[in-house]
Amino acid sequence: MPNTTKTPPAASAEQFYKAHGVPEDIKSRLESTAILLISATRRSTEETFELGEHLEKAATLLPEGTVEQWAAERCGYTARHIRTLRATARNLVAYKEVLVEFAVGPTVVGKLSSASPEQIEQAIGVARETGRLRVQDVTAIISGSKEGAEQEEVDPFDVGGPDGLKAIVALKVREGMKSFITHVNEIRSHVEEALPKQNIVKKALVEKTAMTARLARAELKSLAQFVTPHPEAANHINSTMIPDRTKWAAVGDLLYNMGSEETWPDKAGLRAWLENEVLPNLNWVSPKPPESKALKVKAASVDVAPAKMAKPVKGSKPEAETFPTLKEGLESMFAGFGIDARVNLTAPERKNTIPTLSEALAKPQTRGPRPVVRGDAKLESAPAA
């Protein structure tokens, strides 16, 4: 743990504070951050992100454009090092978990901080395949992308043969997963917002989540189910079923039941259902990243308030640890067919390929009652022969 004993600022730093009129309370917070930066020696991947986050916070306390001067005079950092750390915190925050998982070194992380999102995804694919990521790997990806940008882009829908089909499937998996997870998170946010209230208004919650649940279930079917002729009527084509008694089957059933008020429990059992079934399943589909213990300890030692984390939901179970994530499961499934779902494609921009829910869904029509999915019941009945 870094030494957090306060040391007096250097004379140049004191001059900096006076020249820029930094108030005493702000100066005290900056000094706490300076001690953390000075005491950092050999850094881990996670600590590299934390230093960048502290520099980003210091930049909000200082006059605009002066954070590099302050860090150089007070902490002895070079301007280039400061820019790299800040770029890491800004540009790689969405990839922090996987970079920490593969223990990507600070030098490699710094190199990757200037890459485009497509290049970052490609670099992470290398890390997954080889178990490590080196500076030369990132350099090759960035330089290769620059050379490729000079060539004419090819629409994967115009590429024939198995390679073209693999490209389209990889594009569908990548974009489809993003959309599905976005809708699951949207449903969860509405449920978490309603639970702390003493009185949960069922009708209002249904209106916020039902149509999104229908869309999410359709996306799950599109990603995870195949098609096959009906065994007794070959002229009918059916979707295959997600295996019964599996977690993904339970998720599909849950999204089906959330798609209509008729298949929600009554008011007496609503809260228990939301706490014990809905949230655990949604958290399993899209687990929330754990809070960094190292960040909490360091933040407390330098009197920097840590980011607020959502309170754990009562009744949720850490089942996600025992099952593969959606991305891992789908990648494994497609690998069995020789399809690499991690292929990084640069397709021509297609605007509005995935419409918003309000655009895609017309006015709901009046329908008959929907059957509740319970236990081993099928999601769809097979057509008659």
Image: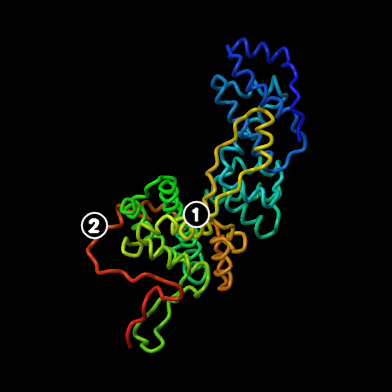
Q: Is residue 53 above or below residue 5?
A: below
Location of mark 1 (residue): 346
Residue at 47% across, 55% down:
275
Q: Secondary structure at mark 2?
A: loop
Location of mark 2 (residue): 363
User: In this orientation, which residue lies closer to the viewer: 92 or 204?
Assistant: 204
Marks counted in the figure total 2
User: In this orientation, which residue lies closer to the viewer: 339 or 194?
Assistant: 194
Q: Is residue 370 left or right of residue 346?
A: left
Q: Secondary structure at mark 1?
A: loop
Q: Residue 216: percent from the left, percent from the top?
A: 41, 60
Task: In the displayed orientation, state which residue is furthest to the front.
Answer: 268
Quarter holding the N terminus is top right
Q: Is residue 352 above or below residue 265?
A: above
Q: Residue 189: percent from the left, percent from the top?
A: 44, 48
Q: Can you tell which of label 2 and label 1 is closer to the viewer?
A: 2
The local crowd at label 1, few if under 14, some if 14 to 19, many if 20 or more residues have their Cα within 10 Å, is some
Residue at 49% across, 67% down:
164
